[in-house]
Image (spheres, coloured by chain):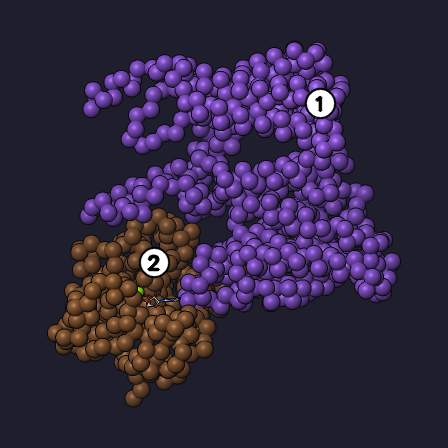
Chain colours: A brown, B purple
Amino acid sequence: MSHLLEIQDLKVTFGGLDALSGLNFHVDEGEIVSVIGPNGAGKTTFFNTISGLVEPAEGDILFEGESVLGLDPHQVTDLGIARTFQNVRLFPNMTILENVMVSQHCRTSQLVFGALFQTKAFKQEEREIRKRAEEVLGFFGSRLIGYRMEQPAFALSYANRRRLEIARAMATQPRLLLLDEPVAGMNPMETAELTGLIGQLRTEWGFTIVMIEHDMKVVRDVSDRVVVLDHGVPIAQGSYDEVSTNPDVIEAYLGRPVEAGA
Amino acid sequence: MTAVTAPRAVTPALLDQDWRSVGKWGGLCGLAIVLVSLIGMPVGLDSRTLVEGRLSLGYLALVWLPVVFGYVVSKRVVLEGVETPDPGLRDVVAGLCCGIVAGLGPALLILGLDNWNLRKPLVNWSPKLLELLTYDRGIGYGVAAWIITCAVLAALGSMLHVVPASVRRFVSYAVMGALLLSVLESAIVDLSEGFGLESLTDAIYAKRGGLTVTSTIILGVVIGGLSLLTKGRVKSATNRYRQMEGAERQRTSIVLFIVVAAVCVVLPMFLGTIMNELLANVGLFLLLALGLNIVVGLAGILDLGYVAFFAVGGYTTAVLTSSQSPWFHPEWHFGIVLLAVVVMAAITGLVIGAPVIRMRGDYLAIVTLGFGEIIRLLFLSDWLKPYFGGAQGITNVPPVDFGFALVKGTDPRSVFYLVLAFCALAIYVSWRLQASRLGRAWMAIREDEQVAEAMGINTVNTKLMAFVVGAILASFSGAILAAKVGSIFPNSFMILVSIIILVVVIVGGMGNIVGVLVGSVVLIGVLGGPRQPGLLQEFQSFKLLIYGALLVFMMLKRPEGLVPSARRSQELHQEEYLQDAWLKGEDHDQEEAEAQAEAVAHAPAGVEGEGDPS
Ligand SMILES: Nc1ncnc2c1ncn2[C@@H]1O[C@H](COP(=O)(O)OP(=O)(O)OP(=O)(O)O)[C@@H](O)[C@H]1O
Ligand SMILES: [Mg+2]
């Protein structure tokens, strides 16, 4: 059986700098895989490459056995890969509800005609979009629903913005969810809560998850497997315990002058 | 604590001023007065009387400056947590000093006018200006008069901070109301004639134009009094409307809609030709602005060549209906032609849109600017002259015959009704699309195109659709223009049209239907369109200057437009701390809720505060 996501010899260069090179790994349906590594290791670049924002120099990315290279970002999302952004990028002037509604775009189809004549199909679809939006927002308890749904996204607290990012990705109805540092900037309580929710994303929503995270506690608690990148090169793969005791990994994180990590 | 604040509570010495700021604002005000004089406003506008024998539009163009600058100079920046002394006499002194400095501007100008002749580079450096500035009573009188006038007016302006809020409200409404009544004289006279109330306006307005002095005072007091009575009512009414739910809200909305529709339909019957013509022009530009609002306001595509679609609509109509069309003249009926107009606009939208839509921001703006000009030049060219008549255009576009009514340019009322129908259509389209899957996708693209794409939106197709919908609305406007004017020339489609529509959308409030409506009424109705005169016909030659100044002012001070959507005004004026509430502690959810409730309560304030001269 083929893997859900398969990365083959991936190499990405930015004007001579190898942001990623020789990356090989795969993710199976239902797994939670964490990608870790020091700053500038190429983790976000890896996500950008999968979601079609960056073109790789070499290698291939297969999703359900089909290459996603050369597809536009919206086509990748259409196939079932959704992501969040490390530097939270919501649609700030749209309401929370609209943020989640708009990301169902590729799962819906009504255009001008339906909207102007308020056809049955249009109203039905709007109802479904709204229902799904509320469902997704409800995943985070009472934090994003109620009166807040009509608030603009810029008015949210930082932690809630992160939650909304995840909700927005969930609303695209993906099979594979890419989370870029989901708990960055959250306090320990919020982090613990979100860690639990990430587990639920797999068990209750059936998403397969690839997560970039610096918080080792979160990585330990949720991931089946961990991939460690350093300077764009994968230096270790395996369970958390294997990886965290790997001397190469410890060196990558600690054994180097700080400025070399940039 | 008390030991530190105690000395601050004492009223500071009158002359303990921030002289730098007084000098700066005074100097700026003086410069502004000189500038306004030299561009010819006082002389050009002197013939229009506002208050009989006392105030002409020309003087008004000068004297409002010290009032506003006086107000500004004594305005305090209120910092949270820092105690500011109550406004007092000291602020009036600041205004007074600012006014004296400002008065030096016109004073020096008078001396200059008297001693040198700079007529060559400065066209308006004329004896007429000198006469006007000195009130025709000699140099000394003029210099003294201006310094004193400026000082007094600036002091009055700064006094607005000192007097109680109700007095401030009374005064500003009284002054604004009286000015509005005198400025809108022609419209009001026309309207009252329609209702057979000439005696009323005869009493208010002097024979040779302008309010009489007594009526100015009476009307000012009445309006000021009314403003005190209605204080807060408007706000609470809109709040109540906002809070209504379900069936009640629907009922109120229907009633409101019927009232507005009835006014729009009935009012023109009582208006004369000139006013109807003006309304028809406002409608034509409103239609354009609504279309551009979809493109710029919703989808965030800065299209500077929007006039191209206006031209396509006009030419399609002219070619298909006119008997004088040089090449192809089927002389179809307007109704059928509209279908052709839609098709042509959509095709042009796609042809122009497809190559430019992938560009970002500035590049797109420049390229569309080029396309807009190319379309006009094509219609003007010798090459296409056999088809579109070149510079002579196409004449003899017939009036629109609906069987039960004839819409022709000589009967502006009929044109207005036609325009009204199309504007209603455009408003409906904007409203429905805004709250649809497509509208949300447009907004997402406006917010962050890359993320929108990553969230599954095909940005190229979606943006093209905005382009086409905008194009179709503009082409309707062009079609009506052709039928209204009865002919079509390339010169009606200058780049200026694109710019002015864009200003209307920005000044009114981007992405907001009501804003666009208010924007077109205020700008096109009062100032006038590129060629069409507005209520203030005297401003014809200064129109572009005012448009420009207004645009700069709005961008700096009120980027959300005259009528902001509640959401946008929050965004642009909200304290940053909301975002970082999480830093303050565990229980930030609570704080956030409170802060947001407060933000909602403040949001409608922007609309209500229109009358304030701030
Ligand atoms: N668009 C780009 N153009 C040029 N260089 C880039 C670009 N994007 C990333 N890089 C470089 O590629 C390297 C990897 O960056 P990336 O953002 O993937 O790191 P990261 O592992 O996500 O780091 P962090 O933990 O700080 O998020 C860095 O050296 C970065 O400067
Ligand atoms: Mg990163």
Disc number for residue B207: none
Q: Which residue in the rendered view is the most extreme toward the bottom?
A: A1
User: Residue B469 appears in which quarter of the rendering?
Assistant: bottom right
Q: Residue at x 81, y 64 (%)?
A: B383
Query: What's under tag 1, amino acid-wise?
Result: Trp
- Return the residue at label 1: B116
Residue A43 falls in image quadrant:
bottom left
Whether residue A178 is visible:
no
Q: Chain of mark 1?
A: B
- Residue at x 14% of width, y 76% of height: A246
Viewer can see residue A84: yes
* Residue at x 29%, y 41% (from the top left corner): B594
Instruction: Establish whether labels 2 and 1 are both on one chain.
Output: no
Whether residue B541 is situated above or below residue A100 in the rendered picture: above
Residue B520: where, in percent of width, then height?
Answer: 62, 42
Q: Return the chain for callout 2.
A: A
User: Under tag 1, what secondary structure?
Assistant: loop
Q: Quadrant of residue B241?
A: top left
Question: Viewer-proximal residue, B382 or A109?
Answer: B382
Instruction: Say whether residue A254 is left or right of residue B418.
Output: left
Label 2 neighbourhood size at 10 Å, few (<14), some (14-19), many (20+)? some
Q: Which residue is mark 2?
A: A88
Give the image quadrant in which the ligand numbered 1 is located.
Answer: bottom left
